[in-house]
Image (spheres, grey):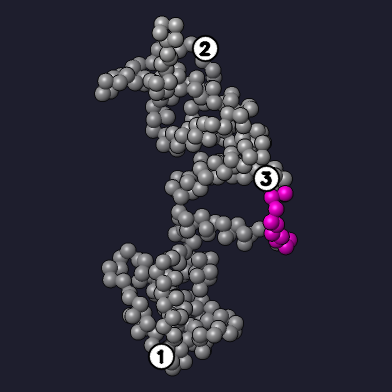
Amino acid sequence: MRELLESFRLPGESQQIARITETFASEYFAAGPVEIKSEDAVYVLAYSVIMLNTDLHNPQVRKRMSFEEYQKNLRGVNDGSDFSPEFLQEIYDSIRKREIVMPEEHTGSLGFEYAWKELLTRSRQAGPLVTCNTPLFDVDMFKSVWKPVISAVAYAFISFDDDYIIQRAIAGFRQCATLAKHFRLPDVFDFVVVSLSQATSILPETLQTSVPNYPIVEVEGQKITVSNLSVKFGINFKGQLAAVVLFNIVNGNGNALREGWTQIFEMFQNLFVHSLLPARMLQMEDFLGG
């Protein structure tokens, strides 16, 4: 029932819902379920699942239906007898712990699961899945998929504002960087760095040869440079997040970088020009003075 309801938008008219439920009951009972004795019992049980889902998860419903009330509503429905308490408890707990969400309501982790399920459904029929207990093919598989995978992760990070998707994208960047380092693939590591650096919005459009005279304001005893980039970066939460993730990935993994160093130093140069680096990075020990 969950698979059915999560695959399309349930209409609002009761007659249409009834016809959908009747069709489901006919097909489900034809499969020979052990616990259910008649097609009518399937129909009532399916309808009860829809009502239970609404009752347990609709914010407008103040008093939630208890298991005892749900069990009482289905008394004598199974062709004159009762469903087993264990069977109904399993249904009740499943709906209580995990809401049946319609397609238009899919967000967060539920949205990710729904999108993944849709992707699998629309994909072409694949060959038989072979599970190996050896990492022999890991590097070759990673070499064949890393570019579209990182591009997809970068697109999701830039395009979506959902917290769960952003977290998954960050995890994807980190995992790809870890694999690139493990398999000694500097081109892949560079691609991760370039993708994240572009998302920070602090890469300079043109390299500056002189430091412009930006206005400086003092806030709580600290001097702050006011420039277009500093303001833009200050209100760009996702850009700040990309910068944090990027520097965390690069930190300690310098040997894995090649061409990506260009983006790193350009970003540091731009941060320096706009006085966005912390004070401790601008200070140097006077070794000669002692």
Which part of the image, by quadrant, shows the C terminus? Answer: top left
Residue 218 image position (x, y, % from top left): 28, 19
What range of the chain is rendered magenta?
127-137
Q: Main secondary structure of the magenta part?
A: loop
10 Å neighbourhood of mark 1: few (<14), some, or many (≥20)?
A: few
Residue kind at label 1, given as amino acid type: Gly
Residue 152 image position (x, y, % from top left): 59, 44
Which mark is nearer the camera, 2 or 3? 3
Element class at badge 3: helix
Snapshot quadrant of residue 68: bottom left
Residue kind at label 2, given as amino acid type: Thr
Residue at position x 59%, y 36% in the image: 192
Residue carrying label 2: 209
Camera-side residue of 42 and 89: 89
Whether residue 198 is visible: no
10 Å neighbourhood of mark 2: few (<14), some, or many (≥20)?
A: few
Camera-side residue of 119 and 240: 240
Residue 129 forms part of the magenta stretch? yes
N-terminal label among 2 and 3: 3
Residue carrying label 3: 142
Q: Is residue 34 above or below residue 273?
A: below
Residue carrying label 1: 76
Residue kind at label 3, given as amino acid type: Phe
Q: What's the distance in space between the residues labelled 2 and 3, CA to CA?
A: 41 Å
Q: Is residue 268 above or below residue 146?
A: above
Element class at badge 2: loop
